[in-house]
């Protein structure tokens, strides 16, 4: 009887170990697939500036400080986005980030940065409900009508963003905004592996984002996206 129980436990351990190996393989395999699929569409600044018929430069939101100013990572995304606009890569900027609660507003800080750099307010759109990378891409297509975009974010995040956009049918390209090294980069890289797996699955089922709403064409006036408390002219 004891010998039989021992064999059962051995098989249980082997099964658990095998499932674990398969799980790890699935995670790293999916991660590699996302990176490989998106890699050909990640360009240099100069290459992106030569693309034709780009609807907008899509700058993805990131943390803002308690005083409302952009964090280092967000500042660099904005710096790259403005530089691409200035070099004629696209006629519009789409700032997509989190403005889901009072007292925290990524997109207002993002638009202020661009306007302070001399970009006309009507050329800067704000997506107030870009609560995740997936939702930013979904809304870029369905709310703003984008068909061809240049996505700006840090390199580690760029593979997933481009992958999602292309899975949604957007002709998407990416440009890195890594002007420096950032604190916590190792932890972000590890979390990003899991995020790529999650969003690869999300792109199979294509759920609607938290909010949709009326269409605001990207070729129109960005001031239509200003909220009621906006101080933009």
Image (spheres, rainbow, N blue to C red):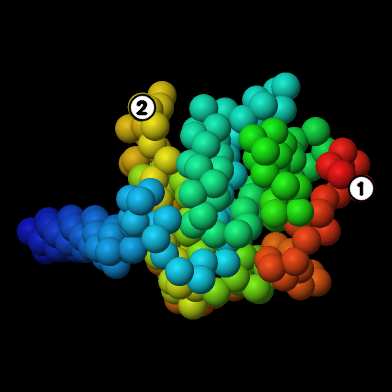
Q: Residues within 10 Å of mark 2 (few under 14, many from 20)?
A: few
Q: Identify which residue is drawn at 34% across, 41% down.
A: 190
The reply to whether residue 202 is visible in this rendering is no
Earlier in the chain: of badge 2 and badge 1, it is 2
Q: Position of residue 121 (x, y in %)?
A: 75, 48
Q: Quadrant of residue 206?
A: bottom right
Q: Residue furthest right?
A: 228
- The residue nearer to you, when weighing 110 against 61, is 110
Q: Quadrant of residue 113?
A: top right
Q: Quadrant of residue 37?
A: bottom left
Left or right, 170 with reference to 95: left
Q: Position of residue 74 (x, y in %)?
A: 55, 36
Q: Position of residue 101 (x, y in %)?
A: 79, 42
Pointer 2 and pointer 1: residues touching (CB < 8 Å)? no
Q: Identify which residue is drawn at 46% across, 46% down.
A: 153
Left or right, 145 with reference to 137: right
Q: Residues within 10 Å of mark 1 (few under 14, many from 20)?
A: few
Q: Identify which residue is drawn at 41% across, 65% down.
A: 51
- The residue nearer to you, when weighing 178 against 81, is 81
Assign a secondary structure to mark 1: loop
Residue 181's label in the rendered image is 2
Seen in the picture, residue 143 relative to 9 is either above or below; the reply is below
- The residue nearer to you, when weighing 222 against 69, is 222
Left or right, 72 with reference to 18: right
The N terminus lies in quadrant: bottom left
The C terminus lies in quadrant: top right
Seen in the picture, residue 23 relative to 152 is either above or below; the reply is below
In the rendered image, which residue does mark 1 sit on?
A: 228
Q: Identify which residue is drawn at 36% across, 27% down.
A: 181
């Amino acid at each position: 009887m004891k010998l039989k129980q021992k064999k059962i436990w051995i098989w249980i351990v082997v099964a658990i170990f095998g499932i674990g190996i398969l799980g790890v393989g699935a995670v790293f395999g999916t991660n590699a697939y996302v990176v490989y699929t998106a890699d050909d569409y990640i360009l240099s600044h100069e290459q992106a500036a030569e693309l034709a018929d780009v609807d907008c430069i899509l700058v993805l939101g990131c943390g803002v400080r308690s005083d409302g100013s952009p964090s280092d990572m967000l500042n660099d995304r904005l710096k790259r986005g403005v530089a691409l606009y200035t070099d004629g890569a696209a006629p519009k900027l789409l700032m997509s980030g989190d403005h889901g609660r009072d007292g925290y507003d990524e997109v207002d800080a993002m638009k202020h940065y661009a306007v302070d750099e001399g970009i006309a307010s009507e050329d800067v759109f704000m997506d107030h409900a870009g609560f995740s990378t997936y939702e930013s891409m979904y809304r870029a297509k369905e709310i703003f009508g984008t068909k061809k975009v240049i996505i700006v974010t840090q390199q580690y995040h760029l593979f997933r963003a481009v992958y999602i956009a292309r899975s949604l049918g957007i002709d998407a390209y990416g440009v890195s905004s890594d002007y420096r090294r950032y604190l916590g980069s190792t932890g972000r890289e590890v979390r990003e592996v899991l995020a790529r797996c999650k969003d690869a699955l999300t792109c199979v089922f294509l759920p609607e984002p938290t909010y949709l709403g009326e269409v605001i064409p990207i070729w129109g006036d960005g001031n239509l996206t200003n909220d009621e408390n906006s101080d933009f002219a």
